[in-house]
Image (cartoon, rainbow, N blue to C red):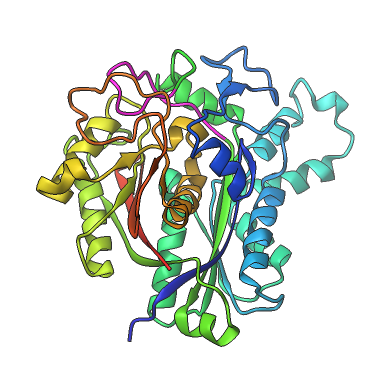
Amino acid sequence: MTHEVLLTGFGVRTAFGTGADALREGVFDGNPAFAPITRFDTGPYRTGLAATWGGAVPLREVLADVAGAAVAMAGLPRDTEAAVLVGTAGDFTALTHFWRTAPGSPDHAVETDRAAVADRAVETVPGWQAAALGDALGVRGTRLAFTNACVASASATAHGCQLIATGRADVVVCAGAYLVEEENLAKFGSGFALSRDGAVRPFCADRSGLLLGDGAAAVVLESAGNARRRGARALGAVTGWGAASDAHHIARPHPEGTGLVTAARRALRRAGGPRIDYVNAHGTATKSNDPAETRGLHTLFGADAPHVPVSSTKSTTGHLLEASGVVELVITLLALRDGVLPPTAGFTEPDPACDLDYVPNRPHKADIRRALTVNAAFGGANTALIVERA
């Protein structure tokens, strides 16, 4: 027996602020959130721009805030039996703090409490973040961290769906978070992946790369039976999920988007049909990703591909790394519930290799009943989630 997976609560925070209305005013209005980074000195790096919410906040606090909001929306009591699955690479700010205050470092002399440094260091461990979130929520059950880069929180969500569908769990909290920090800014900069002009223009001929962004979100998934017993309101249903690896290159997707196609086809098989009304694309505005994703969507939808609207909300939020999957799932859910297609902001001239409907610059009203959100990561990892209107 396969159990239906319902989404009964969510919490979200991006550079636009906290909650659904902040996303409506930013992402859905097509207003990019990019601004100078103020939480650390960006002088050594190729860009000083990102979509951030200001000062540094411990990752555990951000995760607890969004997951707490999701649990409150779902009406889950404390001490509920619920798995907690988190997409995270740990708290990089804690890692930076540890090394900067280690013996022999320039800041070592000003650090007086080595125990405090050690306490922060444990927050760099991804599994600790999942355990700490479960404690903060006061729920009982499995706690797992998913660390596979930009598909981490989408992988956590897919695993949560599988737990519910197979009857191994009735309630799962899936979350992910990333805060812009120096290590990844340096890495993406050294790989020439960051935008040279401060704008992110997915699928455009003049695109020059991505910019990073702060993001965190959590969703509560429940079996339909459990939600019915509790009298919980379904916000949507996750009807399909899939994952695949094309193993083509450590940093570039297969040029034909084969991993995306495989993951999406698996999700569509679970969902029981090929119809998709909107795609929230991975859309990084990099030279390799966008044409590969476009070719993959052509393969997936065939003759219908030109008629399926596709947009990249990274054009407004920035790339949220481990948090991308779950934040973009919430955005996709809002698109379904509001009947609005979020635009690809800053759209100029399309790349000739990118020839789909990318919802340029302005939101569109649409009757969206079933949507697909896809993500990809270094190493050839791909995920696909299908969400339907309740």
Residue 163, how many percent across, how many down? Answer: 43, 74
Left or right side of 298 for 309: right
On screen, 14 above or below 162?
above
- Magenta: main secondary structure: loop
Give the image location of residue 42, x and y in percent: 62, 17
- Residue furthest right in the image: 112
- Nearer to me, 84 or 114: 84
User: What is the quadrant of residue 154 in the picture?
Assistant: bottom left
Position in image of residue 63 (x %, y %): 65, 53
- Specify whether residue 196 is painted magenta: no
Looking at the image, residue 286 sits to the left or right of residue 261; the answer is: right
Question: In the displayed structure, would residue 210 be above or below residue 376?
Answer: above
Q: How many marks?
A: 0
Residue at screen point 29% across, 24% down: 287
Q: In which quarter of the image is the N terminus?
A: bottom left
Please state the horizontal and vertical placement of residue 188, each as a whole percent of the image: 46, 26
Q: Is residue 384 visible?
A: no
- In this view, the residue in front, 131 or 325, is 325
Q: Give the range drawn in magenta.
A: 200-213
**Image quadrant assignment for residue 128:** bottom right
At x 77% / y 48%, what residue is drawn? 119
Whether residue 333 is visible here, answered yes or no, is yes
- Reply above or below: 12 against 364: below
**Of 158 and 198, which appears nearest the observer?**
198
* 203 in magenta: yes
Left or right of residue 244, residue 182 in this image: right
Residue at left offset 18%, top offset 27%: 353
Q: In which quarter of the image is residue 220?
A: bottom right
Spot the residue most to the left: 303
Tell me the quarter of the image containing the C terminus.
bottom left
